[in-house]
Each structure stands twice: as structure tokens, then as C-alpha cells.
Image (cartoon, helix red, strand yellow):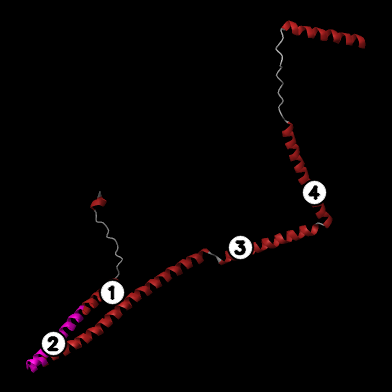
Amino acid sequence: MGALFGKSKKPQSRITDQDRAVLQLKQQRDRLKQYQKRVELNLEKDREQAKKCLQMGRKERAKLLLRKKKYQEKLLENTDVQLENIEKLASDIEFAQIEADIVNKLRMGNEALKAANDLMNIEEIENIMDETREGAEKQKEIDSILSGALTDQDEEDVLAELDDLVNADEAEKNAANKIDDDAVIQLPEVPADEPVADDASEEPKRVKEKEKQKRVLVEA
């Protein structure tokens, strides 16, 4: 609730003093241009009136009007000079703002670059480079030792052993595939004849028992 009734902070204006100065100079320039237009109209009027006065024989009045006209022409020349000064000053201020902005951006860039450089320690970078170089040299020595310790016959034996391993692996895979193909579940055939009664099925059993006893007697 206190925040509702408290004083709210006004947003910071982005208009600088230089912007206000340029704006005032441009407003003054516009007023001078309007003044020039009025003076130019008056000059033309005074010249026409001076002609009429001469036609009417009022030479002194015509001379007075021409003097007024001449004075206003000098004022008009002065306003031209003032306009030139105002426009030059406004341009200088605007260009100074651009230069100030460039300098500010350069300052920010230098600070960012300095912060980035502070994160990188020269000694640490040199240590990393040395360790990388030592690791590469060590690996190179290991490769050289390994390559020099084996003869041509050793290399051939290594390749032959590799071929044996590949062939054995392929043989195992082929055997496994063959077992999978042969492992077919065979179900018993369904008898086509109708089932026989228990009395009828006992007769073949008795016949088989008698034949078995005869074979035992003969062998004895």
C-alpha cells in the first residue's frame, strides 16, 4: 500500500543538454528565416511605394522609403550571417555528440578487451602449450618404439591372426544362424482313425508280450 501512495520515480530522460541546445538553435534558425521572409516582402513593398511617390512628385518620401529599404537589406545580410553561424554551431554540437558516443563505445570496448585479457594468464597459456607439446612428442616416441620393435614377419603374423579372428567370428555367426533354422518345432500328427475301445487295445499288448517271451527262450 505504501508503494501505491508513495512518490513514483520519474523515468530518466534520454534528452541531453546538447540535444536541448541543438533544438533551441534550430528554433532560432526557423524564426530568423521567417523574419527574412517578412523583410523581403517589406522590401518589395517599400520599393513599389517609392515608385508611386516619385510618380506623384513626392521625391523626399520616396528617398525615405529607399533609405528604409536599404537599412532592412543590411539587416537581411546580418540575418544571413546569423543563420550561417547558427547552422554551423548546431552541426558542431551534433557532430560532437557523435564523437562523444564513439569515444564512449571505444572506452567500453577497451574495458571489455581488458577484462578478457585479465581472464587469460600468459604463464598458464604457456604451461598448457608446453604440456601439449610434451604430450605430442611422447606419443610420437611411443609410436616410433612400437613401429621399430616389430619386424616384417611380426607384422605378417599380426595380420594373419587378425584374419583368423575375423573368420572365427563369421563361423560362429553362421553356426548360430544354422541352429536357428534347424530348430523347428515338430508337432505329432493327428491320427486319422477313430479311437479304439480299451478291450480291443489290450489284444495287441498281449501279442507283443508273447513274442518277447519267445525271443528270451530262444536266446537262452
Q: Is residue 47 left or right of residue 151?
A: left
Give the amino acid at mark 1. Answer: Val
Q: Are marks 2 and 3 in contact (CB under 8 Å)?
A: no
* Residue 107 to residue 2: above or below: below
Q: Nearer the viewer, residue 54 or 14?
A: 54
* Residue 11 to residue 78: above or below: above
Question: Secondary structure under badge 4?
Answer: helix
Q: Which residue is mark 3?
A: 128
Give the amino acid at mark 2. Answer: Glu
Image point (74%, 59%), residue name: 143
Compute the Cα span from label 3 to label 1: 56 Å
Prevailing secondary structure class for the magenta stretch in the rendered image: helix
Q: Which residue is mark 1?
A: 22
Label placed on residue 48: 2
Mark with earlier residue (4, 1): 1
Q: Which residues are magenta?
A: 34-62
Is residue 220 among what the camera can see? no
Q: Which residue is mark 4?
A: 161
Is residue 200 among what the camera can see? yes
Image point (58%, 64%), residue name: 125
Question: Secondary structure under badge 3?
Answer: helix
**Is residue 59 shown in magenta?**
yes
